[in-house]
């Protein structure tokens, strides 16, 4: 069985919150679709890839929103059970001293609520990573089709 130090736990929990946001720059695609000029593309595979990308993009945005919602659940849970200052030491606040409050940080690992929140958060995060991979694959296929 692997054990972690309390300080290591702080850095691991910090990493959970470092998932970022997704932003799409799709002005050219939107203009192409909304203007009706997509009909001028003769390559049916390319047209299908463009439509698939827009559908997958919407799905990725929804999953990203779910990840951020789960993030809120996790942080609200931690506010009540864990010294956030210790986690923030690994971010921009860069605290040099841990919280002076004496809290047994290991107790959260014995609570079903923490396990369920973390499991749900990780499930959504993995789903988001998969959706990003699908989008990347579609973009690569679009590039191949435009090089023909």
Image (spheres, rainbow, N blue to C red):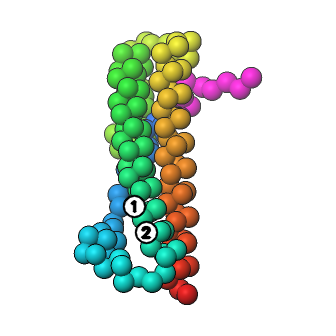
The residue sitting at 52% across, 12% down in the picture is 111
Q: Depth check: give the residue in front, 91 or 36.
A: 36
| Extreme-left residue of the structure | 35
Task: Describe the element under mark 1 as helix, strand or loop.
Answer: helix
The residue sitting at 34% across, 23% down in the picture is 76
Q: Depth check: give the residue in front, 144 or 103.
A: 144
Q: Are marks 1 and 2 in contact (CB under 8 Å)?
A: yes
For label 1, the residue is 54
- Magenta residues span 1-13
- Residue 40 x %, y %: 36, 83
| Quadrant of res 47 | bottom left
| Quadrant of res 144 | bottom right
- Residue 17 x %, y %: 43, 38
The answer to if 11 sits in the magenta stretch is yes
Label 2 Cα neighbours within 10 Å, binned few <14 / some 14-19 / many ≥20: many
For label 2, the residue is 50
| Extreme-bottom residue of the structure | 148
Q: Depth check: give the residue in front, 17 or 102.
A: 17
Label 1 Cα neighbours within 10 Å, binned few <14 / some 14-19 / many ≥20: some
Q: Quadrant of the N terminus?
A: top right
Can residue 83 be seen here? The reply is no
Secondary structure mostly seen in the magenta stretch: helix
- Residue 120 x %, y %: 49, 29
């Amino acid at each position: 069985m692997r054990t972690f130090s309390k300080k290591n736990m702080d850095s691991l929990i910090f990493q959970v919150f470092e998932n970022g946001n997704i932003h799409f720059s799709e002005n050219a695609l939107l203009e192409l679709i909304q203007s009706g000029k997509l009909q001028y593309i003769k390559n049916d595979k390319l047209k299908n890839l463009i439509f698939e990308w827009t559908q997958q993009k919407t799905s990725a945005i929804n999953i990203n929103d779910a990840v951020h919602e789960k993030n809120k659940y996790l942080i609200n849970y931690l506010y009540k059970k864990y010294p956030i200052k210790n986690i923030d030491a690994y971010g921009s606040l860069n605290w040099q001293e841990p919280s002076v409050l004496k809290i047994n940080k290991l107790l959260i690992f014995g609570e079903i609520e923490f396990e369920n929140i973390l499991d749900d958060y990780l499930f959504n995060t993995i789903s988001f990573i998969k959706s990003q991979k699908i989008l990347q694959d579609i973009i690569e296929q679009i590039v191949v089709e435009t090089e023909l």
